[in-house]
Amino acid sequence: MAILPRSLVAQTSLSVGCFFSDSNCLSLAKAPANSGRIADERFSRIIEHAHAKVPFYVDRLRPIPRHIDTLEYLATISVTTKDDVEAHFPDGMTDDSDPADWRMMSTRGTAQRLITIQGFAKRDAVRAAQLRSLRLSGGYRPGMPMVEIPPEICEIVCGEEGEQEQGVLSHAWGMLRRGQLRDKKAVRDLRGLVERHWILNRKMYPGFGRHGSHPPTEVLDEYLLRLRRDRPYVLKALATYLVAIARHIHTENLPPLQIPVIKTMGSRVTPGQRPLLEQAFGGVYWDDYGSAEFGAIACECEHHNGLHVFDDFFIVEVVDAEGHPVADGQRGWIVVTDLMNTTMPLIRYKIGDVGVIDHQPCACGRSGPRITVEGRAHDTLVDSQGGWRTTDDVVDFLEQCPGVVAGQVCALGSQRYELTLIEDTHVALDQEALREQFAEWIGGQPTVKLQTATTLRPEAGGKFRYVRGDLERSSNHGSVG
C-alpha cells in the first residue's frame, strides 16, 4: 500500500479507536496555541490533587497564593529525587484511584532503575506526546513505515522480539472468548496494540546482543540488507546501534540508505556524531527527549536549535545543586513537573540528566522554553577547575583522537581515570600521546590508565554507558563549565 493511502487509513483507524476507548489522544497530540494558560490550569489542579491525595506531598506542598507566577511558586518546592520515589513507593507516591486502572512502568536507567505508575489519562497523554514528537520532528504521519532497534533489555522485559502483530489478534480473540467486547480496559489495551503494531506501521529489529557495541561486518551487513528492503521513513534506534551502522557504511564506502528521518531511543547522539549519521543514512537527524517516567517531553523543530518542551504537558527547569533555577545557557540538573499524571504525581522530579535551558523565542515562531540535554549526571566528569565534562564532551573528545573509534572513561576518584578504547583498524593508536592529550584536557595531574578492547558491553538495562563520572560525588557541585 502506498504511503499516503496507508496513512489516511491509519489516521481513520486511530480516530475510530480513540472514539471507542474514550481517548483524547488525537486532540491532545495537537499543540495548543494557548499552552501557557493550559499549563497554569493543569499545574494548579495537579498541586491541589497531590496535596490532598498523595501522602508524600501533604507536607511538601502548600496552597498556591493568588497572583503568584507558576515558576516562582515551583521554586519554593523541594526537588523530588529518585531516592524519594524509591523510599515512598508505592503507597506514599500514589493517590486513591482504582489500581485496576494503573500500569507500572519500569525505567531502564544506567545507574538507577525505578518503577512508576500511570493511569489511563497519563497513558493517553504519553501516546499523544509520541504522535506530536513524530509529527513535529520529521513530519511523520500514522501509517508511514518505521523501524526501531531498541536496547537489548526490551526484548527480554517487554517481550518485543521482532514484529508482534499476532499479539493484536490474540488479544482480540481473547476478548471475544471472555465476553469482553464492551470492557473498557480490554478495549483500551487492544487499541494500544493496534496503534503500536498496525497504525504506526512499526517493525522492530533485535539489538546487537552478544556482539556488544561493535559487531562484525557480516552482522552489520544484515542490518543494511533489512533496512534497504524495508525502506522505513523513520529509523529509531539506540545511539550505539545507529553510530555502528553509520560507521560501517562510511568505512566500506557504501551508498547511503536514504532514510528521511533518523532518531535515537533510550540514548543520545553527540553533536560530533550527527553529520556521520545524516551522511550515512541519507536523511536528517531529529533530536528529542523523553523517559519511561514521562514519555516524550520535548523535540526539535526544523531549526535544530534546542528541544521545544511540550509545555502544556510538562514544566521543565534547569537547577543548581540546591534546586534553584539557573540562568539561561548555564549548565545544571534537569527537573520535570508532570502536569498529566494524577495517579503518581512527579513534581520537580530530578530526572538525572544535565543540560541548559533557553526561554528566548525560537526562529520557528514558538515562544516556549527550549532545552539542550547534554548527558546523564552520573556520566559527567568534573575537571581540575570544577567544570563539567558531559557525556557529549567526553565522547566527542575521544572520537576525534587518532586511532580511536570509540571509548569509555571511568572516574575512579582522586584524579584517577581508566580509559577503555576501541582501536581504529586503519589508523595506529599512540597510547602515550592520547594519555597526554586526556591529561591536558581534564587538567591537573591525573593518573590515566589505558586499555583496549574489541567491543564494549551494555549495562544490565541494555544501554551502553560511555562515561562513569564523578559529578554526583564531587564537592564541586556548584561549579558548572
Image: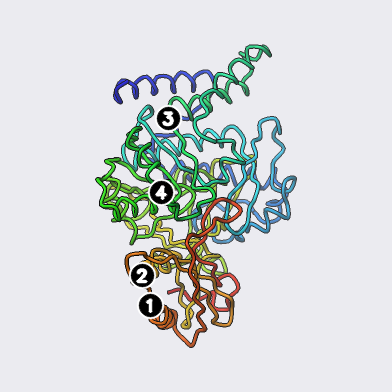
Q: Earlier in the sequence, mark 1 or mark 3?
A: 3
Callout 3 amino acid? Leu
Residue ranking furthest to the right:
91
Q: Residues within 10 Å of mark 3 (few under 14, many from 20)?
A: many
- For numbered disc 1, what is the local secondary structure? loop
Numbered tag placed on residue 288 in the rendering: 4
- For numbered disc 4, what is the local secondary structure? strand
Q: Residue at x 46, y 77 (%)?
A: 387
Residue 20: image x %, image y %? 52, 18
Q: Residue at x 29, y 42 (%)?
A: 257
Pick the front one: 114 or 68? 114
Q: Residues within 10 Å of mark 1 (few under 14, many from 20)?
A: few
**Of labels 1 and 4, the one closer to you:** 1
Residue 270: image x %, image y %? 38, 59
Callout 1 amino acid? Asp
How many angstroms separate mark 2 from mark 3 (CA)?
41 Å
Contact flag, marks 1 and 2 (Cβ < 8 Å) = yes
Whether residue 261 is situated above or below residue 442 in the rendered picture: above
Pick the front one: 152 or 49? 152
Q: Which residue corresponds to mark 1?
A: 430
Callout 2 amino acid? Gly
Residue 291: image x %, image y %? 52, 48
Whether residue 426 is situated above or below residue 46 in the rendered picture: below
Pick the front one: 26 or 111? 111
Q: Which residue corresponds to mark 3?
A: 200
Q: Which residue corresponds to mark 2?
A: 403
Quarter of the picture containing the N terminus is top left
Q: Earlier in the sequence, mark 2 or mark 3?
A: 3
- For numbered disc 2, what is the local secondary structure? loop
- For numbered disc 3, what is the local secondary structure? loop
